[in-house]
Amino acid sequence: MKKILIMGAILITGLTFAQAAKPVLEQDGDLVKATYYYDNGQIQQQGHFKDGKLEGQWVAYDLNGNKKSIGEYKSGEKTGKWFFWNDKSLSEVDYSRSRVSEVKSWKQDALANK
């Protein structure tokens, strides 16, 4: 069940990255920084491209500017640890070559008791 919920969060975040909103692009060394915005002016997501592929850290935010997810791309593939936040939990998803290799999840009650 936990993996299904995590995969749902990943799918939603992936769809957020694939939305048709046009980014604001800026040259950043050998990378192109892309910033997508919600209609209310808040940043929706931000990250870089290199040679037309997602590269480096990408961060997604909700309509109020709260962080929803953060993760790394290398040559267009998800890699390393990704973190997904919602109102009640934090999920850590480890990727290897854009494939989920491990999932950990913490609920708000468990986080508050530490």
Image: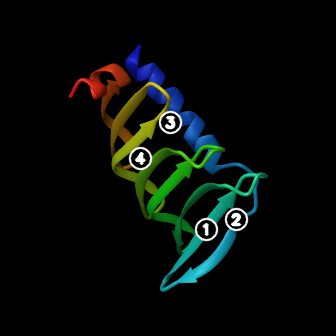
Q: How far across and how far down the image is residue 73, in percent?
A: 43, 58
Return the disc, 4 or 1, that comes first in the chain's sequence.
Answer: 1
The residue at 44%/55% (across/down) is: 77
Return the disc, 3 or 4, that comes first in the chain's sequence.
Answer: 3
Amino acid at pointer 4: Ser
Q: Callout 4: helix, strand or loop?
A: loop
Density class for disc 2 (Cα within 10 Å; few <14, some 14-19, many ≥20) is: some
Q: Measure the C-alpha gap from mark 3 to mark 4.
A: 12 Å
Amino acid at pointer 1: Ala
The residue at 66%/44% (across/down) is: 63
Q: Measure the C-alpha gap from mark 3 to mark 2.
A: 21 Å
Q: On the rendered image, what quadrant is the C terminus found in? A: top left
Furthest-left residue in view? 114
Amino acid at pointer 3: Ile
Return the disc, 3 or 2, that comes first in the chain's sequence.
Answer: 3
Contact between marks 2 and 4 (CB within 8 A): the answer is: no
Q: Measure the C-alpha gap from mark 2 to mark 4.
A: 23 Å
Q: Callout 3: helix, strand or loop?
A: helix
Q: Which residue is mark 2?
A: 23
Q: How far across and how far down the image is residue 80, in percent?
A: 31, 50
Q: Callout 2: helix, strand or loop?
A: loop
- The foreground one among 9 and 88 is 88
Density class for disc 4 (Cα within 10 Å; few <14, some 14-19, many ≥20) is: some
Return the disc, 1 or 3, that comes first in the chain's sequence.
Answer: 3
Q: Which residue is mark 4?
A: 98
Give the numbered dot on residue 10.
3
Q: How far across and how far down the image is residue 59, in percent?
A: 50, 54
